[in-house]
Image: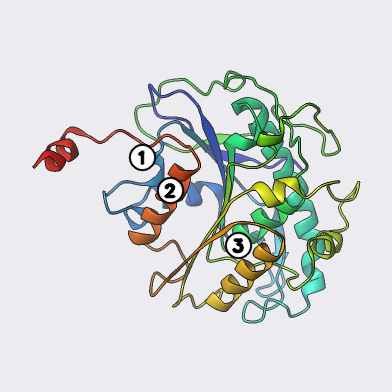
Amino acid sequence: MELGCSVISPLAPHKHTHTVIFLHGRGDTSRNMADALLSRWSRDSRGRSLVDEFPSVRWVFPEAEPRVAETHGEIWPQWFDVSNMLDLTDAEEMQVFGLRGSVASIRRIVRREARAVGGIHRVVLAGVSQGGATAFHTLLHLDDGGGAENAQGELMGLQHPQPQPQPQQESGGDGAQKDDEDDEGIPAHESRLCGVMGFSCWLPFPGGSLEETREVLGMEGGWPKTDTVVRNTPAFLGHCADDSLVFVEYGRQLRTGLKSFGMSVEWHEYEDGGHWINAPKGVDDAVEFLKAQGIPLAEPDEEEEEGARR
């Protein structure tokens, strides 16, 4: 299934240099996720949102397919169903079907965005809660190519002026690549995502090796032939100790699992912030992580420059 997306284009006059694909949590929508990332509750210590701090980024917010939520007996947008949020391993087998389909859909979006921006090394996968869980399983199923073609950011009208960042609805079908389509000739140093970020999230089916974790979903065509993308992609994890929905112990378990796969993991644990991104410290940390991956940071405004000179 091709997923619809809300999109925030790079801020004029900046050219498109990177794409962040940001997955919402269970029961949320792409538009709400975009609005939340722009809200005053998601600002850094400079009072800026992540969108403000990285004006050359195209922000893509896919929307999960509506599925029956067994815990509530209602139809919600969710990447996969969960039997018991207090024990995420309870009836865990029911998560496989939805997660398999969601990983396939997000993988197609990664490839599409990689073609538009010039390679998977310019794409960040991120997510909150169940969106983060899905983002990490998507990473585990990315191959070296990922669908990268250097289109110099011209395929999707990415450089049109946009005075204010406003989410736009976009269909999921444009430029979509078949799930079993491979790409050739990707340089070794580009065989990675720019980064992967998870906030208040967990790893479904933990405790196994990378091969065992991949095998659980039984993806069509099997799993990637190498571990290059997984091992080369840096990870950022942020979790609040007072998270009452996804307990911080699940976040620590995710950290352990990723390290066992050979990944470099940056772990940040905060005293408060609940089931969300800690602000402002957590947003500051996310800014520093993205900056370290080579994403251009916004220039300081005149007031900040004057303050720095004093």
The residue indicated by pointer 2 is 35
Residue assigned mark 3: 26
Task: Pick whichever of labels 1 and 3 is earlier in the sequence.
Answer: 3
Q: Nearer the viewer, mark 1 or mark 2?
A: 1
Dot 1 amino acid type: Asp
Residue occupying image coordinates x 83% and y 33%: 182
Query: Looking at the image, which residue is at 35% across and 60% down?
Result: 281
Q: Quadrant of the C terminus?
A: top left
Residue extending furthest right?
221
Residue at x-position 71% and y-position 67%: 204
Earlier in the chain: of badge 1 and badge 2, it is: 2
Name of the residue lying farthest toward the left? 310
Identity of the amino acid at label 2?
Answer: Asp
Number of other residues with Cα within 10 Å of mark 3, as a class: few under 14, some 14 to 19, many 20 or more: some
Q: Is residue 264 above or below residue 173?
A: below
Image spot of residue 27 (x, y percent): 59, 61
Bin the neighbour count of mark 2 within 10 Å (Cα to Cα): few under 14, some 14-19, many 20 and up.
some
Residue 56, percent across and down? 44, 31
Query: Secondary structure under badge 2?
Result: helix
- Please state which of the two labelled residues, at mark 1 or mark 3, is closer to the viewer: 1
Please provide percent x and percent y for residue 60. Answer: 56, 40
Quadrant of residue 83 in the image?
A: bottom right
In the displayed structure, 174 sits above or below 169; it is above
Which label is found at residue 52? 1
